[in-house]
Amino acid sequence: MIDDPRWRSFPILNRLYGQWRALRANRSNPASVPFSRAWEKLLADAGIDSAEARAEADRDARQLAEAGLITLKSFPSRPRLIDRVIVPFASEARLRTLFGEPDAGSIHPALRSVLVAFEARPHPRLESRWSAWCDELLARHDARRSLRPLDGTAPETLQDDLELLYRLTARKWPPHTPIRTASVELGLHSKALEQAQARVETALAMLLGEGASLESLGIVVSTPWLLVNGPLQLEFPDGVTVDLAPLHGLTGVSELDLDRARGLTTTAVRVLMVENTKTTLRQLASANRDHSTLLVGASGATTPVRLFLQKLHCGPALFHFGDTDPDGYHILEQLRTESALQITRFLMDYRPEHGSVPLNPRQQRLVQRLLKSPALADCHAELSKMLAANQLGNFEQETYGPPALDAWPFY
């Protein structure tokens, strides 16, 4: 059967092929279960949401099923509605041919050649650690295991991934190198390293050990500014003190100044760290008229936030106001762990909501891990409620409405 090359333009098949390729394209042996995807999930992944686009996707899917390239599974009670899309084993070779994908028999030797070449390549800084890691990747490859986070679906992409990691670790980066500067110096476009950050840092942790990151190499990946509002004094080693108290709007303190400062002091009654810097923090700054609160943007345990917590002289009570989704609680855990300070959660009780978005598998795993975290002992009851409901609930801190610092119960 000759497949129509125009099928490659079908959004539904294009997305299905991409997902199949990521999991199956480099297998030399067939999987035990045919690859499949839920129809509604596939539509969402392909960005198909309008009634017209859905109808067109339905027609495309039925045409592909008629040609035998895919199989459609319908709901037993509603046979006209598609439930799942399945890629039969017999269609995998056709998919490869249709999209110009080489067969697995030729991919595996080529992937191995790339790994062998990098294993033999001397590393100027990591010496035996680099070759040992490449040996581990070779063992995974020979055992037909995934090379994730590296892209093991094609020799060219594996070559690019390893080349990036080699060059990234082969040089000593000056402290506070902006991530976009590093990206350009590596010969990439300015945003390339940002876009690959999660994958690169997972690989760095495997290569260098737990906790390794771009920041540990000297590359600044977070916003190099700390957004604050309220009374804050920066004391520098040369005796100069910079007082931000007279400023009433949000002020950015550079990471370099925080690093250079000998210490930080405040006359505020409390420090309130706020996760959402683009909305809630700005609203609170407008309401912080008497400057009794020092507001600090803290969308994560970034380097500026860590420096702030390290250098703030003891005195005011510390609070954190974040979203109550799993990531919001994870930020609170990071702040407490990184600083070893007593940071009280503020307005961070789980709020159930009818029809809320269900937890995805990653969020479920994160909640289960957070439930074992000693740093979040006071949040375990809220996390348990979220896990039992299997829903995010009403988690956005913006839903508390216009801020009223003087009316909110801090104690």
Image: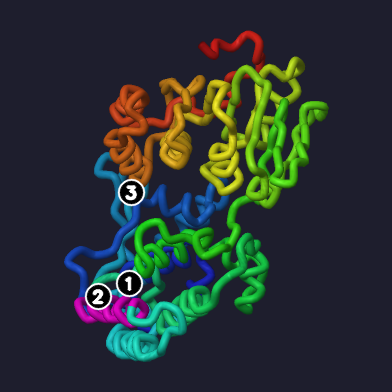
Q: Element under label 1?
A: loop
> Helix, strand, or loop for circle 2?
helix
- The question of residue 138 being in magenta is answered with yes
Is the residue marked by circle 1 packed among few (<14), some (14-19), or many (20+) residues within 10 Å? some
- Mark 3, Cα crowd under 10 Å, few <14 / some 14-19 / many 20+, is some
Task: Give 280 or 77, whichever is nearer the viewer.
Answer: 280
322 is higher (above) or lower (below) than 86: above
- Label at residue 140: 2
Contact flag, marks 3 and 1 (Cβ < 8 Å): no
Q: Earlier in the sequence, mark 1 or mark 2?
A: 2
Return the x and y of residue 271 as percentages of the image width and height.
Answer: 60, 25
Q: Residue at x 25, y 44 (%)?
A: 76
Q: Position of residue 77 (x, y in %)?
A: 27, 39
Name which residue type carries label 1: Leu
Q: Looking at the picture, which amino acid does disc 3 mark?
A: Asp
| 407 or 314: nearer the viewer | 314
Q: Give the side of residue 211 with respect to residue 90, left or right.
A: right
Q: Earlier in the sequence, mark 2 or mark 3?
A: 3
Residue 83, label in figure: 3
Q: Nearer the viewer, mark 3 or mark 1?
A: 1
**Which residue is disc 1 drawn over?**
147
Q: Residue 171, percent across and down?
A: 54, 77
Q: Percent from the top left, x then y, of residue 175? A: 61, 63
Image color mode: rainbow
Residue sticking out furthest to the right: 246
Q: Specify the amino acid type for callout 2.
A: Arg
